[in-house]
Amino acid sequence: MPLILVLLAAGAAWAGWEMLSAHYNREVQKFDLAQLDKMEAASVIFDRHGKELAKVFILNRNPVEWERISPMMVNAIVAIEDNRFFSHKGVDWAGIARAAIANYRSGRINQGASTVTQQLARNTFDLKERTYQRKITEVFLARRIEESFSKQDIMRLYLNRVYFGSGFYGIESAARGYFGKSAADLNAGQAAMLAGLLKSPQALSPWNNHEAATEVRNFGLKRMREMGFLTRAEYRDAVAEPLQVIKRTNPFKTSYAVDLIRQKVIAALGFDRAMNGGFQIHSTLDSRMQRAARDSVRETLARVEAVPGYSHETFAQFSERVKSIEKEIDRGNMAVKMPQPRYLQAAVLAVDSASGAIRAMVGGREFKHSEYNRATQARRPTGTAFTPFVFAAAYEGGVFPGGLVEDACIDNRYVMVGGESGILGEWGVERADNAYEGNIPLREALAKGKNAATVRVGFLAGLDAVGRIAKACGISSALRPFANAFLGSSEASLEELTLAYTVFPNGGMRPERLFLIDRITDASGQVVFQNQTARVPAMSPEAAFQTHRGLEEALHRGTGAISASYGLGDFPAAGKTGTAYNFTDTYFMGYDSSVTCGVWVGFDKPTRIFRGAFGKDLALPIWTQIMNAAAKEFPAVRFNRPDTLQEVEVCRMSGLLATPGCAQAGKNPATGAETETSTIVKEYATEAQIPKIPCDIHGSGIRTFTKEFLESDWPRAQVALDLSRIRPVAVNSPALLGLTDVYGSVQAGGRNDEIPVARAIPVSSTPDTEPTSTAASEPVYDYTAPPPFTITSEPIRASEVGAPGEDNLPVRRAEAVHPPGNTSPEAAPAISAPTPPPIRF
């Protein structure tokens, strides 16, 4: 009877199991096992060389293939999580029995005996309820998975999906996040720590509890030794090695460049697709240049803040004040609020001149302190960094670069920078001992940063022409309709200004826009996005090259000459410092044949940095380091002159064609100053720009306004008088002492200063009265007063008096009055003049 009861019980149990199995087998068929291999994957950002920079994700996961997983990681999982992984069929029945007994005794479910396969099923299909029904479903689903996948596939899927804490999903993200290396390179100790984290990822995190993480690592190493995965020596060495992890960072608080790439990817693909699609984002960034930009900003501004008397809050002071907030951000606490930083900031943008690809971007000194990207979002006065576009507009309008512009003080009422009165300041020269130089060539005015001369060039070109050039070059922000716009009072972003400067190395062309993403590919390598940027014309090649020559001189002999002391490499380059009024914003904008780089230094809220804070001292050192790094990646070559520009020799002092006299040392006839070197300089000009007359300082005479000159293309501003209607005064009869044309009015050079001239002494009107004082040696000449005369107005031919020009112009003629009673024409009115008193010589 007992045997029958046992058999009946066994039969009933078997029938019940079959019924249960049939039920759950039908239930687990509802699960789509294809979902095991479909998991949210982070999109990875690479630099131009294929080096990983960052990720774009909701869940920080980067699935890898079996071959890219360290064998030590697999051994650690087996030793700690599932001893019988390679032998069971998805369920460890002995482990289940052991856990069931423990849970029965405690009255609740405290332990589990889930295998790796069961955990994979639970994590994939969200089987999280702590009930027996959920546990049974998990068992049957694990068996189905084992029947459908190999052990390698199951372990790979498990390691790619499981959560390792601190925001890391999957073994690849965890390995890089904790140790800065790929999952394929993990050693035994690192693998043991990661496997141990799975029981309690947050509590055992090495960033939260380094001691607990070390203990769980050592436990894992012990289990690996017991299972024969490690030798005794390997175990001993691994336990003795200190647990080292990299510094914790917030993956959402990386850098300005990565944040902008993330925004661009979302715009191109959509949020969900970008965050979960596992795309490979190939950026245009160059890691070496990016590192040089970041480091040069930190080092240079730290030196500025260390200058004695610096009165603003420093980066170090602010960082100390917000240290606790930074730690919370690194822990992933996005609820804490960072106060607005008020320390000195900087922005950098380095781009490929031809394509517009961004090679380096710095939007501020610390992204965790402020996400405001000063390279793309901030619009600040461009200062004297804008002046090249004023000169370019003038050159585009036909002005000769070797022509003269007055370098002299100018009434600030014409410009109104910092007020409405006084004299315009000269901060553009970036030196305290500026001296006005009088007339200087336009090219020199640009190179030396002369403010007043620049304003005069702006008046010559016209504000509308300057605005058109600026817009064509890529400065989309509006130009102020006032003369102070010539000196950069208008606001623009560093992105706009850097794009505009690409015109000069590109011979008047520029990229249509700047860009950060070259292409995006999916997991299969298919291109889903490809950047396409065209080139557009901005100015003539001639104007671009002529402006470039001024910028080349500015870098090497003008306001940027100090770059040599900063270690600028020996390669062709050009650039311009920039300082805004009151020293609130400083720039250096420059380029070589391959890379254009812009640097800005200032405060978020316009504030004087300090008096004398020039672009050459704050921005130029940063630019120099970046361009040196760029030259290693993108070698620079010499700039080519357009064939349409002719080389012409001109006199620097007159702006006219050079003569043999310009090459001789001696005294300047105009000023008497000693000149030790030739005044001849080489300029490049179009046929229309080349001067038509020779130097009038070292040449054969004083400049004469001939008809040919006046009808030439001489760059004249709007004049008050039409000189073509003004004729020289012609002398009708010999002057005193027999000289003709004593003032050189018709024939230049007619005066002879070596002829002695007698002194005129007034004498008494009475003939018999002697002069009061006359030296015995002085001759006395009697001069008889002429008869009274009248001035009549009648048309005569100019040829009668020998004057050049048009005929039949009204000229007043002096003639004697007819004696009283004599008949004479009455047509012309007469003006009588009294008889003068006698004069004795």
Image: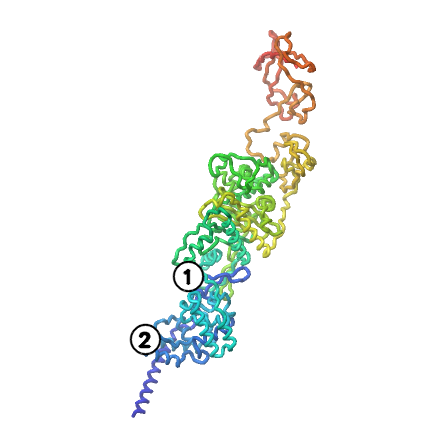
Instruction: Give the spatial CA distance, label 2 vs label 1.
Output: 34 Å
Query: What residue lies at 64% left-to-right and 7% top-to-bottom?
Result: 768
Find residue 583 and report its horizontal and vertical position in percent.
49, 44
Find residue 327 and report its horizontal and vertical position in percent.
42, 60
Residue closer to the observer: 722 or 41: 41
Residue 545 in sight here? no
Query: What residue lies at 46% left-to-right and 37% top-to-bottom?
Result: 419
Which residue in the protein does label 2 denote? 108
Which residue in the protein does label 1 denote? 332
Of callouts 2 and 1, the N-terminal one: 2
> Residue 58 lies in what quarter of the image?
bottom left
Q: Is 328 situated above or below 3? A: above
Q: Amino acid at mark 1?
A: Gly
Crowdedness near tag 2: few (<14), some (14–19) or many (≥20) residues, C-alpha within 10 Å: few
Residue 304 in sight here? yes
Residue 113 image label: none
Q: Is 142 situated above or below 165? A: below
Q: Amino acid at mark 2?
A: Arg
Find residue 250 and report its horizontal and vertical position in percent.
44, 61
Residue farthest along the bottom direction in this orientation: 1
In the rendered image, the quadrant that contains the C terminus is top right
